[in-house]
Image: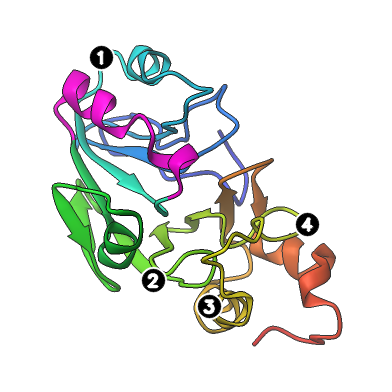
Amino acid sequence: MSGKNALPIHPAGHAFTPTSGLDRRELFGFLGASLALAGATACTRQPAEKIVEQSAGLTIKHILATHGHPGHVGGKDDVKEATGGLTGIHSADAKQFLRSADRYLLDGDELDFGEFKVTVLHTPGHTPGSVCFVVANHAFVGDTILAGGIGRQTPETDLRRQMMSIGTRLLRLPPATALYPGHGPATSLERELAQNPIFRGAGARA
């Protein structure tokens, strides 16, 4: 993997990349210090067995959810049972959706692995406990922002709050930050600023 959006390579030589073949990245396995970060999903349409199969040979430490909608966390317990990884979700969505986890995440939390840190950004709006996970120049953004749009509104969505989260949290990241949404293709903050309709009339980066 190369180019400005290439994920960093661990000194041991393991690529730090999202798992291929999945159309969602709502859960990701946060792996051992000498291994890699694997994009994953827990969804009734993507069986936990497939996630476990794609993680073969890796030591899963954490299974983190960007938010608590059923399609994004439905298989987390099966993945946990198979891999031994610890689950994490923001406390607000744990309360909203009655989700249990091994760790209840808060804004600013940092999880270490090797030379890297995963930083938790609380980006409420799509759900009260929506979060984004930032690793170096890459962000796993769930349904807070998608390529060309934002996540579908649900009864618990607060659109004004979601737009505030995008403007005050995500737009503070470097423009070249690669974004891995919960649906659709990967993109970048720079590309979304130029093309996403939610930024029309914004003029410049906040």
Identified at 63% across, 43% down, the residue is 183
Q: Is residue 110 left or right of residue 3?
A: left
The picture places residue 102, in percent across and down from the top left corner, at 13, 47
| Nearest to N terminus: mark 3 or mark 2 | 2
Q: Which amino acid does label 2 sit on?
A: His
Marks 4 and 1 close (CB-CB < 8 Å): no
**Label 3: few (<14), some or many (≥20) within 10 Å?**
many
The residue indicated by pointer 3 is 165
Identified at 61% across, 51% down, the residue is 4
Q: How many marks?
A: 4
The residue indicated by pointer 1 is 57
The residue indicated by pointer 2 is 122
Q: What stretch is highlighted in magenta?
A: 69-85
Residue 11: quadrant of the picture: top left
Asked if residue 74 is among those painted magenta in the image, a careful observer would answer: yes
Q: In this view, does 38 lie to the left or right of 57?
A: right
The picture places residue 127, in percent across and down from the top left corner, at 47, 64
Q: Which amino acid does label 1 sit on?
A: Gly
Marks 3 and 2 close (CB-CB < 8 Å): yes
Identified at 74% across, 60% down, the residue is 149
Asked if residue 131 is among those painted magenta in the image, a careful observer would answer: no
Residue 17: quadrant of the picture: top left
Label 3 secondary element: helix
| Nearest to N terminus: mark 4 or mark 1 | 1
Where is 130 relative to 140, above or below? below
| Nearest to N terminus: mark 4 or mark 3 | 4
Marks 3 and 1 close (CB-CB < 8 Å): no
**Label 2: few (<14), some or many (≥20) within 10 Å?**
many
Of all residues, the one furthest to the front in this rendering is 155
**Label 4: few (<14), some or many (≥20) within 10 Å?**
some
